Amino acid sequence: MDNPVLAAPVVAVFGLVVPFVVSLLKARSAPTWLGQAVAIVVSIAAGAASVAVTGGFGDASVAEVLGASGAVFAIAQTAYRLWFAATPLNASLEAIVFGSPATGPSLAVVLAGAATVLALGP
């Protein structure tokens, strides 16, 4: 990271955004290990993005990306456990893609059905 002064705030912002993204990408009924796997993948992507924002990949090392990813993951897990998990927004985001039994088919099911119809043709 070329700009260490900017690095900490950028990593912190990415860390606070990750719980929203993870909740959007996982279902409420998903196993804990799957939620953690999604959180790790999103944190690695956010860590790489933070390195890109603060100095680019030109001279960035794998250690810098992994360090930023680890920091993003730690911040995201802390924010999720201490605050975000118990909010109605978390439940709403989890239901957007995969839906919930009470709300009927989710956006993912509707889109998959539409894609199947388009692929098969009339």
Image (cartoon, rainbow, N blue to C red):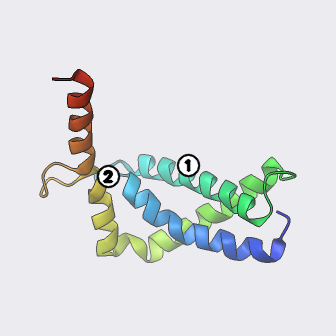
* Image coordinates for residue 91, horizontal then vertical, percent: 29, 66
Residue 52 appears in which quarter of the rendering? bottom right
Relative to 101, say whether 1 is above or below.
below
Residue 95 appears in which quarter of the rendering? bottom left
Residue depicted at 27% across the width and 50% down the height: 98
Q: Spatial distance from mark 1 to mark 2, Cα to Cα?
A: 16 Å
Q: Nearer the viewer, residue 87 or 2?
A: 2
Q: Nearer the viewer, residue 44 or 51?
A: 51
Mark 2 sits on what residue? 27
* Image coordinates for residue 73, horizontal then vertical, percent: 60, 61
Q: Is residue 3 left or right of residue 83?
A: right
Q: Is residue 70 left or right of residue 77?
A: right
Residue 121 appears in which quarter of the rendering? top left
Query: What amino acid is labelled 1 in the image?
Result: Val
Mark 1 Cα-neighbour bin, 10 Å: few <14, some 14–19, many ≥20: some
Mark 1 sits on what residue? 41
Residue depicted at 76% across the width and 66% down the height: 54
Disc 1 secondary structure class: helix
Residue depicted at 59% across the width and 56% down the height: 43
Mark 2 Cα-neighbour bin, 10 Å: few <14, some 14–19, many ≥20: many
Relative to 103, say whether 90 is above or below.
below
